[in-house]
Image (tube, grey):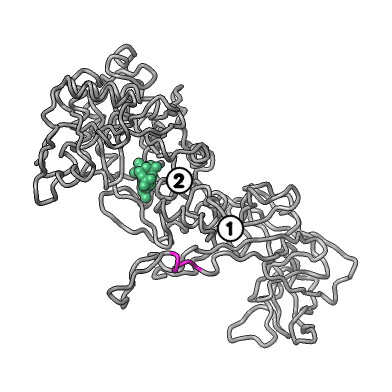
Amino acid sequence: MSSPNQPANSPAPAANFIRNIVEADLAAGKHTLRHWAGKPGTASDQASGPLDPAKIRTRFPPEPNGYLHFGHAKSILLNFGLAEQFGGRCHLRFDDTNPEKEEQEYVDAIVDSVKWLGCSWETGGETNLYQASNYFDWMAQFAEYLISAGHAYVDSQSADEMRANRGTLTQPGQDSPFRGRSVAENMDLFKHMQAGEFPDGTHILRAKIDMSAPNINLRDPAIYRIRHATHHNTGDKWCVYPMYTFAHPIEDALENITHSICTLEFEDQRPFYDWLLERLAEGGLLQRPLPQQIEFSRLNLTYVVLSKRKLIQLVDEKHVEAWDDPRMPTLVGARRRGYSAEGFRLFAERIGVSKNDSLIDYVLFEEAQREVMNLSDERRIGVLDPLKLIIDNYPADQVEECFAPNHPLKTELGQRAMPFSRELWIEAEDFMEVPSKGYRRLFPGNMARLRYGYVVECTGCDKDENGRIVAVHCNYLPETKSGTPGADSVKVKGNLHWVSVAHAYQAEVRLYDRLFSVPAPGARREGDAPDLERDFLDDLNPVSKQSITAQLEASLKDAKPEERFQFERHGYFVADRIDSKAGTPVFNRAVTLKDSWGRAG
Ligand code: ATP
Ligand code: MG
């Protein structure tokens, strides 16, 4: 996960409970005797290989049924970060055991997003990119082993009967009438299930554990179901598919995963995770030590929705333009918005990892982004709401160069020449005909500095027939040019940015704001009637996107897609990676220079 533009002062990773577990395991030598045959496999497959060169193995296991969002970034950075920190490997595994929902479009987008975050599954001479559906043969074989060892049986109750017999939190479940089937009968039925002889839902393979276990997940959970469906990878080879809770621990174990990190909602599944792997290891099918499941709290962010269902709704109902709309909390959206991968990393490091559910303020995310961009991004000038300034005492045919530093903190990035001429664009808000109290910029009789240029004295303005101001007039003080000996002979308080009218690049600029206008979209608010149900869509920010025509300094015409700059006084802007054409980039504002929402929102 090394990155060329890591801020020089980025802190060493802070301790957290998962790092502590890994460190203790390493100190105890827990994983040193594992073998690794160079690819996933059973105990005997792995035994044929050398000792595993990876100190630890983690994995990021997305289901390819949607685009990755900010929450996934937390998990990706945690898993790849641990592997990097401790001399391990992190696998990217597509958890594609469910035949219905996967699509190549999602697979491609996930690969791109993980790479964009700066994470690599190609380290230490290995390529650890896997598809869980390639393990179906092993999974079926393991299921048969469980049957043969008396640890699984075919149940033929209806779904309703199974539900009714599962019991509740306070009541134990009831044994299925099929629970006593012989090993031979179970094996025979499972073979016929695999042969496609039964319709969907008629039989199901269940682990045989304990119908009165206090943890409902141990009450004979289903492990294989009949689904006559075509799978994107295995086609029509299978008409039985493993349940997620059966497949996932096996995937981890086959891949030699040492620390299987997941979100808290899987905590209640851990006993089954351990039960299953223990049974299979007893049978000699899996190498020990077995992977350890560790849960952490998922990322929740204010002003954002991270549920796949809601994100799909935003796209399908066209509340946003696409999955990569810069307002979407997806990683493709973040990239297009101009957020930096480095900013994600700083944010993830700052919020840390714990078991406590918390709601993180979006401001923290934006602050991390600003901090990274402030260090990395070159400065440019953009006038977003242009008003013409005419310097009446400057020769009409004259053009001269003013020099602006590319980065105030990095002199090594040099400076660039900006053409200065008689007519300039300034921000409309930088002139007031009748100044408000404390206003320091241009108003008749006042002087202000044109940044990197001259001090000018405002003389008045022109208006159209509707009384709208169309141009501001001023005279310049020739001895005040920035960088020349007399520059500060005249002291002024206002400092304005500008671009030369004759040289400016007129561009489309999109100003993005938060997609939702309240911290918890769709949540009930104080004073709501007891029966009121809110819809997250009602909390959409009506002005989350504004498209404007701005006047930018000429050099921005050459910006490459995804090149990002600080527009002085305005924030961080990126050349849109989709809509920019060579010579006519379109800019997106990633974030303003300062927070305008405030902590309380
Ligand atoms: P689904 O509801 O479809 O399961 P999911 O968000 O869990 O959605 P997965 O593709 O299964 O999607 O997630 C891949 C990994 O990302 C999982 O290990 C999951 O725990 C982790 N993850 C998902 N959402 C978050 C989140 N908000 N914060 C941290 N990790 C997350
Ligand atoms: Mg999931």
Q: How many C-alpha atoms fall within 10 Å of the one at disc 1: few (<14), some, or many (≥20)? A: many
In magenta stretch: residue 35: no
CB of mark 1 within 8 Å of CB of mark 2?
A: no
Q: Residue at x 39, y 70 (%)?
A: 600
The residue lying toward the viewer, choosing from 562 and 336, is 336
555 sits left or right of 14 in the view? right
CB at disc 2 and ligand 1 closer than 8 Å: yes
Bounds of the magenta span? 537-541
347 sits left or right of 545 in the view: left
Compared to residue 273, the image places residue 300 above or below, namely below
User: Is label 1's Cβ within 8 Å of ligand 1?
Assistant: no
Q: Which amino acid type is shown beneath numbered disc 2?
A: Leu
Q: Magenta region, mostly helix, strand or loop?
A: helix
Q: Which residue is mark 1?
A: 572
Specify the label residue 68 is tagged with: 2
Which disc number belongs to residue 557?
none
Q: Of the residues tagged 1 and 2, which is closer to the observer?
A: 2
- x and y percentages locating residue 360 in the rendered image: 36, 58
